[in-house]
Amino acid sequence: MRVASRFLCLFSIAACFIVMPAYAAEDFPSRPITTVIGFPPGGSADAIGRNIAERLSRSVGQPVVISNQPGFGGNIAAAAVRKANADGYTVLFAPWTSYALNTALYGAARVGYSLDKDFTAVSVVAEQPMVLLVSAAVPAKSTAELIALAKRTPGTLTFASSGAGTMEHVAGELFARRAGITMTHVPYKGTGPAMIDLMGGRIDVYVVSAAAVVSNLANPKLRVLMVASKERNPALPEVPTAKEAGMANFEMSQGYGVLVPSGTPASVVKKLNESLVSVLKAPDLKASLRDMGAVAMSSSPQEFAARINAEISSWQQTIKRDQIKVEE
C-alpha cells in the first residue's frame, strides 16, 4: 500500500508539471510581452513596430514593451530572440524580407539563427516599397539624371545603408547594377544616422523604405526620385514608380511580421495571431500605416511561413544572378 501511495503521489506531481505549461498557455498573456526590434529608434521598423505594439497592448490587455537591440542588420536581435523562452512573452518584430535576405546572403551559421527553423511565424503585419532618395546637393532631379551623372563620374557617388548586408545595402547594389553604374557604399548603424548625413550632403544616394521618406518629405535637403513599386504610393502620390522612372527591372519592398521562438505552444501562436489580425483590421491603424507609406496586412501562421521560404529562395536566385557580394 505504501509503495502504491508513493507511486500515486509521484505520478500526481509529474502530471502537474506536464499540465502546467498547458494552463500557462491557456492563460496567455498574463504578464507584459516584450517586442524586440533589431534597429534603433527613428527607423521604419521602429516606427511601424511601435504603432502596432501600442494597439496590440490594448487588444491583449497587457503591456507590449519595445526593446530595441540594433546591430548587424537586425541579426543580433533575431539571434537573441531565438534563445528566448518559447512562451510567447518575447516576440520578434521582424523586417522579415531583410532576414530572408540575410539568410540567403550569409547562411544560418553566420547570422546566428535559421529563419525557417528557429522561429515560428505568427503573422505578416505590413509592407512598404523601397524609395530612391538623393541629397538636394546632388544635381539630379530624376532617376534618369542620376544615372547619367553616375555614368559621367563613375564611382564618385556614395550611397548609404543601415549596415552591411541590410536590405538598403543590397537595394543600393542592385540599383547600381541594373542601372549600369557604380557607387561607393557607406554603411551606418541605422536609418536615422544615414538620413542625417544624407540631409547634410555628406552622402549622395539612399534607397530606403517609404516610412523613412514620408517623415522627411517636407525637408528641402532631400529629393525623392522614385518608388520601387508597380503602383504609386498613396503617401507619395507625386513620386513616379520604377517603371515610370525607366527602371521597370527594379522593384523592391520591405515586409514586416511577427515571429516567436520555435517551440512556442500552438495555442499561444494562435492567440497572438488572432490579436494581430484583429488589430490590423482597425481603420485607424490602416490609416496610420498608410500615412507612413506602408500597407497593413495580415496572414495565417502557415501563409507567413510559406512566404518566408519563398523569399529566401528568391533572394538566393537574385544573389547568384546579380553576383551580390557583401564586404563588411
Image (cartoon, helix red, strand yellow):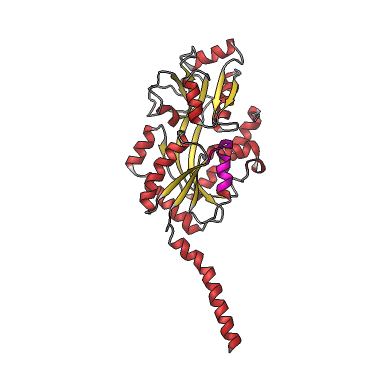
Instruction: Give the total of numbered labels.
Output: 0
**In this orientation, does residue 242 appear?**
no
Task: Name the image quarter holding residue 249.
Answer: top right
Q: Is residue 302 above or below residue 287?
A: below
Query: Residue sitting at 61 percent across and 14 percent down?
Result: 154
310 and 167: which is toward the camera: 167
Residue 126 locus on image (x, y percent):
44, 39
Query: Residue sitting at 44 percent across and 30 percent down?
Result: 212
Quarter occupied by the C terminus? top right
Instruction: Tell me, yes or no, whether the highlighted magenta stretch contains residue 322.
Output: no
Residue 24 placement, left or right of 164: left
Instruction: Tell me, yes or no, whether the highlighted magenta stretch contains residue 72.
Output: yes
Residue farthest toward the top in the current orientation of the protein: 152
Magenta segment main secondary structure: helix
**In this orientation, does residue 253 appear?**
yes
Q: Is residue 253 above or below residue 223?
A: below
Residue 26 locus on image (x, y percent):
44, 62
Residue 167 locus on image (x, y percent):
55, 32
Task: Name the image quarter holding residue 312.
Answer: top right
Query: Residue sitting at 43 percent across and 62 percent down?
Result: 27
Quarter occupied by the N terminus? bottom right
Task: Name the image quarter holding residue 13.
Answer: bottom right
Query: Residue sitting at 47 percent across and 63 percent down?
Result: 24
Residue 33 placement, left or right of 285: right
118 and 187: which is toward the camera: 187
Magenta-tinted stretch: 69-80
Residue 65 locus on image (x, y percent):
44, 47
Residue farthest toward the left in the current orientation of the protein: 284
Residue 67 placement, left or right of 111: left
